[in-house]
Image (tube, rainbow, N blue to C red):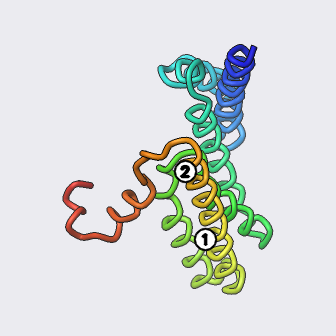
Amino acid sequence: GSYRFALLANVVLAVLTAWFAGRLAVRGFGASKLMGRLVAALVFVLPGTIVTAMFAWPETASRLAFLLFISLVMTVAKNRTAIQVLGLGLFTGLMPALHGRFTLLIPVVGAVFLWWGIQRLVTRRTALLAIFVTAVGYEGSRLLNQFVKRSLYEESYDQETRLLSRLVDPNLWPALL
């Protein structure tokens, strides 16, 4: 019962990921429809998408979230309306709820917001508010992850703190190279 439902949900996520990758290739990057179909097929059959869909939905959901992130960045970079910039900040802040590796996107997106504010591509108020919204989204996802870890995985290692410490601790920078 529940295993079949989870498997079906995972396969649906894999199909959505493949479809969205093809759509992004055509609409976002200007590829031909045939190339978009090829991209969708490759994303679906490459090791990882459909294989991990059989076992763990967060991996497939993370891939779909990253494609949505790319699409959102492309849309916001073209228009840069206040609502879109704030939405990108919130989405970026919430992404670590799916996987800790998305924590590394937060300083990059924050730097982009700061740059847009300095260059006056958006108002400085919008840029600072977007950084704040990103931080609030991240804190919400971090609190949710801590709740889940405490409830389910008491021995879990704090991956987000480890990733962020690599960014700010110069002693660990050689390991990144």
Q: Which residue is mark 1?
A: 135
Task: Establish if 36 lies above or below 1.
Answer: below
Q: Nearer the viewer, residue 22 or 31?
A: 22
Exactly how many numbered labels are in the figure? 2
Residue 73 position in % (x across, y down): 64, 56
Q: Quadrant of the N terminus?
A: top right
Question: Which residue is at a point 35% across and 65% down the rendered structure image?
Answer: 165
Question: Which residue is at a point 65% across and 62% down the rendered structure image?
Answer: 140
Q: Quadrant of the C terminus?
A: bottom left
Q: Nearer the viewer, residue 68 or 28?
A: 68
Q: Nearer the viewer, residue 88 or 24?
A: 88
Callout 2: 10 Å neighbours few (<14), some, many (20+)? few
Q: CA distance from mark 2 to mark 1?
A: 22 Å
Question: Which residue is at a point 52% across and 52% down the rendered structure image?
Answer: 102
Q: Which mark is residue 67?
A: none
Residue 101 position in % (x across, y down): 47, 49
Task: Establish if 127 lies above or below 109.
Answer: below
Say which amino acid is labelled 2: Arg
- The reply, left or right, for residue 100 in relation to residue 163 is right
Q: Which quadrant of the figure has residue 131?
A: bottom right
- The reply, left or right, for residue 112 in relation to residue 91 is left
**In this view, the mark in front (2 or 1):** 2
For marks 2 and 1, the one nearer the N-term is 1
Say which amino acid is labelled 1: Ala
Residue 76 position in % (x across, y down): 70, 61
Q: Secondary structure at mark 2?
A: helix
Q: Which quadrant of the figure has residue 65?
A: top right
Q: Which residue is mark 2?
A: 150
Task: Establish if 14 lies above or below 164.
Answer: above
Q: Secondary structure at mark 1?
A: helix
Question: Which residue is at a point 53% across and 63% down the rendered structure image?
Answer: 106
